[in-house]
Amino acid sequence: MMKGLKKWRLFSLLAALTVFLAGCGQEELSTLLPAGQVGKDQFKLLMLSSGIMLFVIVAVMVIYLIAIVRFRRSKLGEDHIPEQVEGSHTLELVWTVIPVLLVLLLAVPTVYYTYKFSNVTAMDVVDEEGNAENLVVDVTAKLYWWEFEYPNLGIVTAQELVVPTDEKVYFNLIAADVKHSFWIPAIGGKLDTNVENVNKFYLTFDKESKDLKDGVFYGKCAELCGPSHALMDFKVKTLPRAEFDKWVTAMKATGEETTDVAAAGQGEELFQQSCIGCHATSAVGESGAVGPNLASFGDRNRIAGFMDHDQESLVEWLSDTQEHKPGNLMPSFGEQLSDEELNAIAEYLMSLSVEK
């Protein structure tokens, strides 16, 4: 008896903790605290479906409890036979009509929002001068990082998506190797990135990210894609349109820089010798590089998507990439370069910035 009571106490405690923890969430990462219109609309559907399910559960439990209490044997006796309702047209009508109404109540808004979210006709709209009226971002998912190309602006970045607030941003999604899934929990989504076809959708960003804990919203890969799937994060910076335009100008300026070998420091020289074949330090160009674009590496808040953004962590990453992110395609340099050389490269990379 006591063992049974202890089990019920444990179950009650876990149930209470579940309800309590359901209300917790980080603003930069929680679907329950949407910061974009798409996320808000999806949250409405979530609450509607949850409400319908709760109604059904409560109704069934009430009927169940009434039956137990009203028709218990101790009250009515051993020989009591309740009124038989088999073949009742009224009851059959009730339990047919109510489910149909509940399904329609959920189906109509679901279909409406499905078509609304998939409407990307404005993606190709141009003004009288032939310039795109809306921001388009081409997203390429790779093992285990993200590349973002702004085709109408002529710039590329990686691991950090920068977008303006209070306007629709359209996305072309594709994968370079295996299936991934693009998801920014606090903004909306998610949508698969496939190798053979391009998926398209849009998001809106209603809140500036600078006021958040880490100054960014967090994006995730929501499709199991390999041993480092859980580490395939990206960050999203949302800026007012004026600040976004300044960021674009600064990114374009990286293409004007030329490397003076005589004036280059040790870190830059080593980077040109060891890393330039896979990584670009100019944001001007097109997507398709082997490794992430590093033009704004110093502005990021994570290394490899999840490590602390400091020189010490960067040296650890360069020394043994497989230890920190198994299955990624970047080679390790711990056996090829000395600690002094690794520190020099790390110092150079941390200096690459368009915001400072």
Image (spheres, rainbow, N blue to C red):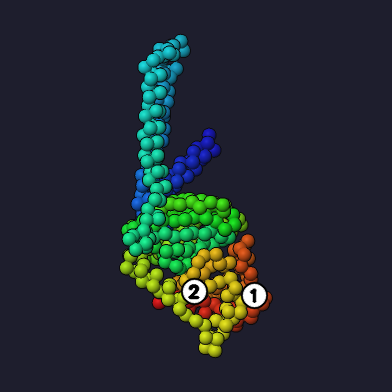
Q: Residue 310, percent across and down?
A: 50, 74
Q: Nearer the viewer, mark 1 or mark 2?
A: 2
Say which quarter of the image contains residue 250.
Answer: bottom left
Farthest residue in the bottom direction? 262
Q: Which residue is mark 2?
A: 282
Q: Residue at x 54, y 89 (%)?
A: 262
Give above or below for 159 relative to 96.
Answer: below
Provide the secondary structure element on which disc 1 rests: loop
Q: Earlier in the sequence, mark 1 or mark 2?
A: 2
Q: Which corner quadrant holds the C terminus?
A: bottom left
Q: CA distance from mark 1 to mark 2?
A: 26 Å
Give above or below for 262 relative to 114.
Answer: below
Q: Residue at x 58, y 67 (%)?
A: 290
Give above or below for 300 relative to 139.
Answer: below
Residue type marked 1: Gly
Q: Residue 133, percent across and down?
A: 35, 59
Q: Residue 115, percent across and down?
A: 40, 43
Q: Which residue is mark 1?
A: 334
